[in-house]
Image (cartoon, rainbow, N blue to C red):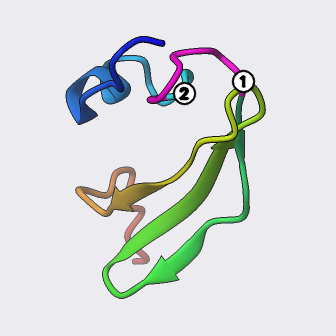
Amino acid sequence: MPTPMTTDDYMSFCGDNCPNCRHGSVRRGLPERRGGRVETPCWCSRCSADWREVYTLTNYVNLKENP
């Protein structure tokens, strides 16, 4: 089995591959808000690894101001 991916490798694949076995069998649960971030539980249906993806707010776009 290959060496687990680094965080940078995982992000370069946009989270589409398991960081443990590198297969595209990633499944995701419901996102959960935890403080200033959102975490999504993930698991691989091929090798049974599990992990959490972490999302943080970095920006907002397309603000429409009310007159």
Mark 1 sits on what residue?
A: 25
Asked if residue 49 lies in the magenta stretch, the reply is no
The residue sitting at the bottom extreme is 35
Q: How many discs appear?
A: 2
Image-quadrant location for residue 3: top left
The residue sitting at the right extreme is 45
Q: Are marks 1 and 2 in contact (CB under 8 Å)?
A: yes
Q: Residue at x 43, y 76 (%)?
A: 66
Where 37 falls versus 61 (above or below)? below
Q: Residue at x 31, y 81 (%)?
A: 36
Where 15 falls versus 24 (above or below)? below
Considering depth in this image, is 40 or 4 the residue closer to the camera?
4
Q: Amino acid at mark 1?
A: Ser
Expressed as whole percent of the image width and height from the top left, the position of residue 16 reads: 56, 23
Mark 2 sits on what residue?
A: 18
Image-quadrant location for residue 63: bottom left
Find the magenta span and give its range. 19-25
Q: Residue at x 78, y 33 (%)?
A: 45
Where 15 falls versus 33 (above or below)? above
Badge 2: how crowded within 10 Å, few (<14), some, or many (20+)? many
Expressed as whole percent of the image width and height from the top left, the position of residue 41 reads: 60, 59
Q: Amino acid at mark 2?
A: Cys
9 left or right of 45?
left
Q: CA distance from mark 1 to mark 2?
A: 7 Å
Looking at the rendered structure, the secondary structure element under dot 2 is: loop
Considering depth in this image, is 53 or 37 the residue closer to the camera?
53
Image-quadrant location for residue 10: top left
